[in-house]
Amino acid sequence: MRLPNNILCRIAPLAILIPLAACSTTSEPNMRPTIIPTFAPVRPPVDAALADPCISAAASKYFLTENHITAVDAEPIGGGVNQVRLRADIRDAMCTVTDKGKVRSIVDTMPKSADQVAAEEAAAAKKTAVQAAPVQKSKKKS
């Protein structure tokens, strides 16, 4: 009795793949590095009465939406005044706010890069050049 040719065509590829599968399954330990999760320290959330005015003021200062600004930490400095640390996109800032929600100041706490300084100088030079140049009146053709 002879096996049909169809069955041999189906078994032959499996016979080739079985040794390959045996080589890939070994009892050796996994040599890939194990990723251990790291956790940030748990901080209490910043009071919304302090964070919201600071976030609104920072949004107008940095020309960002309020979604890109987060309040990281708050600490009282005395006399009803608090300091709120903000993370505005990629910059860090310190907001000084009263207990009633009045923002006194927003100060950058990150140094500026050289390209930021150059861009601000170019903008200031352009602004003074525009203010110094007199505006010419156009003459009407009659």
Image: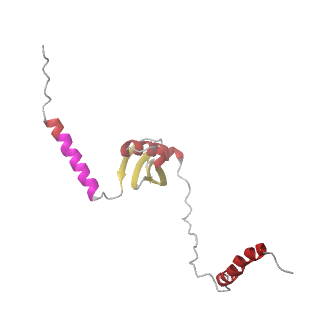
Q: In this view, does 13 lie above or below 120?
A: below
Left or right? Give the position of 75 relative to 35: left
> What is the span of residues highlighted in magenta in the rendered image?
114-128
Residue at the right extreme, as displayed? 1
User: Is residue 140 depicted above or below 30 in this figure?
Assistant: above
The residue lying toward the viewer, choosing from 119 and 96, is 119
Position of the N terminus by quadrant: bottom right
* Residue 20 vs residue 122, the one in the foreground: 20
Image location (x, y in percent) of residue 107 = 35, 51
Give x and y (percent) for residue 12.
Answer: 72, 78
Q: Residue at x 28, y 54 (%)?
A: 116
Judge whether residue 108 can be spotted in this image. yes
Query: In the displayed image of the protein, which residue is found farthest to the top?
Result: 142
Left or right for 20, reference 89: right
- Magenta part, dominant SS: helix
In the image, residue 127 lies at what x, y percent? 20, 40
Q: Can residue 98 be seen in this view?
A: no
- Measuring from the top left, give residue 84's x and y in whole percent: 45, 52
Q: Which residue of the protein is positioned furthest toward the front in this rendering?
A: 1
Residue at (68%, 84%) from the top-left corner?
A: 19
Q: Image quadrant for the C terminus?
A: top left
Asked whether 58 or 78 is in front, the reply is 58
Residue 116 highlighted magenta (yes or no): yes
Residue 89 is one of the magenta-drawn residues: no
